[in-house]
Amino acid sequence: MKIILILNGKTEDDYIIKGFSNYEKRLKHYISFETIVIPALKNTKALSIAQQKQKEGELTLKYLQNSDVLILLDENGKEFNSVAFSEFIQKQMNSGIKNLVFVVGGPYGFSDEMYKRANGKISLSKMTFSHQMVRLFFVEQLYRAFTILKNEPYHHL
């Protein structure tokens, strides 16, 4: 199985770039992992929120194959603790899917088309985080999930 993380727009924050890169390197010891960055939309002031979500959705859907399992990182998604999330990842690996795709949306969330295509939604917290911070939190939790599955000490440090 391959895990793909689709992000909306690149980040300029050095601490996020460094942290993300650190966990991305660690994660690749456990599983095939790819990051796709969708370019941020230009001239958004001329677009309504619905139009922005629509355009972001169209750009994202171009990267998906019909067989991909798509999970949206969404404030209204299912919440997991770290152990339950690791069990979710293990279940996906056991299912025989080729690609497990997670998407961090833009500042306004996802289009209706994205919700229709999604196989599930996960929330990282009831709190609201910037989509820049979510990328770092998520890749750390993904790494943590694999250390839990391998019974390595990282989870308890």
Image (spheres, grey):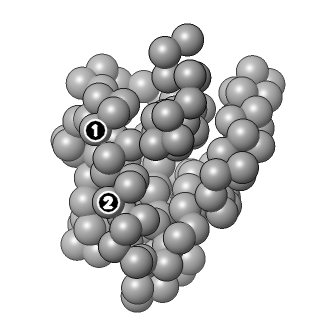
Distance from disc 2 to disc 1, alpha carbons, whole Å, reads 10 Å
Q: Toward which corner of the image does residue 108 lie, by quadrant? A: top left
Q: At which x and y percent is residue 6?
A: 55, 58
Q: Is residue 105 above or below residue 129?
A: below
Q: Residue at x 26, y 52 (%)?
A: 121
Q: Is residue 79 above or below residue 92?
A: above
Left-right relation of 120 to 135: left
Residue farthest front in this picture: 151
Q: At which x and y percent is residue 120?
A: 25, 60
Find disc 1 in the rendering and name its residue.
84
Q: Is residue 55 visible?
A: no
Instruction: Assess whether mark 1 and mark 2 are in contact (beta carbons under 8 angstroms).
Output: no
- The kind of secondary structure element at disc 2 is helix
* Location of the C terminus (image quadrant): top right
Residue 65: numbered disc: none
Give the residue type that dot 2 points to: Lys
Q: Nearer the viewer, residue 15 or 84?
A: 84
Report how many numbered discs are placed on residues in the image: 2
Give the residue type that dot 1 points to: Ala
Q: Earlier in the sequence, mark 2 or mark 1?
A: 1
Q: Residue at x 31, y 51 (%)?
A: 88
Q: Nearer the viewer, residue 33 or 110?
A: 33
Find disc 2 in the rendering and name its residue.
91
Q: Nearer the viewer, residue 106 or 99?
A: 99
